[in-house]
Image: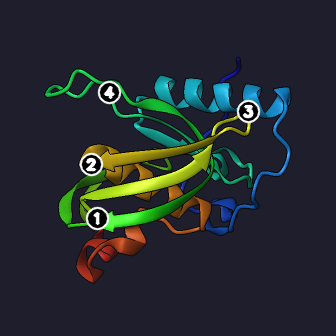
């Protein structure tokens, strides 16, 4: 596994739309492992492929252990699509491409995501709270949307 360079705000790759993954092979699985390792090394909860300069529709996530359930959701999702959104939450959000920057951001409280794993197997995951926030944030990256674009005008000006 290898640590990848995280691209920072201002890098044009962060504003580009990622292409769907069509080839599921050992190289893709290795890249997924590298994404996960890089994200954990940077102490992030999610890291999308464009954030390391690769325009593929995939991201790694690890939101830590849920204190209520004891579950530890983490992994790599390929070609993710949100199929359900429910409710609303506003909470502090940051991004590894904006080190040290945190702002209140409104997202859906719960989502369902249809995706593949790095081997091409179909998955359907439900996320609430922090996990739902992470899924939405990372899928935005795949569409070239940065979290600062979801902030109020005043917060966006301060962030920039």
Q: Nearer the viewer, residue 126 or 59?
A: 126
Q: Secondary structure at mark 4?
A: loop
Instruction: Point out which mark residue 82 bears.
Output: none
- Judged from this view, the residue extending furthest toward the left is 68
Instruction: Point out which mark residue 64 bears.
Output: 4
Provide residue 96's location: percent of width, then percent of height: 46, 44
Find out whether the residues at labels 4 and 3 contact each other: C-beta distance under 8 Å: no
Provide residue 148's location: percent of width, then percent of height: 39, 67
Provide residue 29's location: percent of width, then percent of height: 74, 28
Indicate the quadrant containing the N terminus: top left, top right, bottom left or bottom right.
top right
Instruction: Examine the image and state in which quarter residue 63 appears.
Output: top left
The residue carrying mark 1 is 108
Q: Secondary structure at mark 3?
A: loop
Q: Nearer the viewer, mark 2 or mark 4?
A: 2
Q: CA distance from mark 2 to mark 1?
A: 9 Å
The residue carrying mark 2 is 128
Instruction: Point out which mark residue 119 bears.
Output: 3
Q: CA distance from mark 1 to mark 3?
A: 29 Å
Q: 10 Å neighbourhood of mark 2: few (<14), some, or many (≥20)?
A: some
Q: 10 Å neighbourhood of mark 1: few (<14), some, or many (≥20)?
A: some
Tell me: residue 140, above or below residue 94: below
Q: 10 Å neighbourhood of mark 4: few (<14), some, or many (≥20)?
A: some
Which numbered disc flags the more N-terminal residue, 4 or 3?
4
Q: Residue at x 56, y 43 (%)?
A: 123
Find out whether the residues at labels 2 and 1 contact each other: C-beta distance under 8 Å: no
Q: How is the image coloured?
A: rainbow
């Amino acid at each position: 596994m290898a640590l990848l360079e995280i691209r920072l705000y201002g890098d044009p790759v962060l504003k580009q739309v990622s292409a769907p993954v069509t080839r599921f092979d050992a190289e893709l699985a290795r890249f997924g492992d590298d994404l996960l390792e890089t994200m954990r090394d940077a102490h992030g909860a999610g890291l999308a492929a464009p954030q390391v300069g690769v325009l593929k529709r995939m991201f790694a996530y690890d939101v830590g252990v849920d204190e209520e359930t004891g579950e530890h959701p983490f992994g790599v999702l390929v070609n993710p699509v949100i199929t359900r959104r429910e409710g609303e939450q506003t909470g502090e959000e940051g991004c590894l491409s904006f080190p040290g920057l945190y702002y209140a951001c409104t997202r859906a409280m719960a989502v369902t995501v249809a995706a593949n794993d790095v081997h091409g197997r179909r998955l359907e995951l439900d996320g609430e709270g922090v996990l739902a926030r992470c899924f939405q944030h990372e899928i935005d990256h795949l569409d070239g949307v940065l979290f600062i674009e979801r902030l109020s005008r005043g917060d966006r000006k301060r962030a920039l």
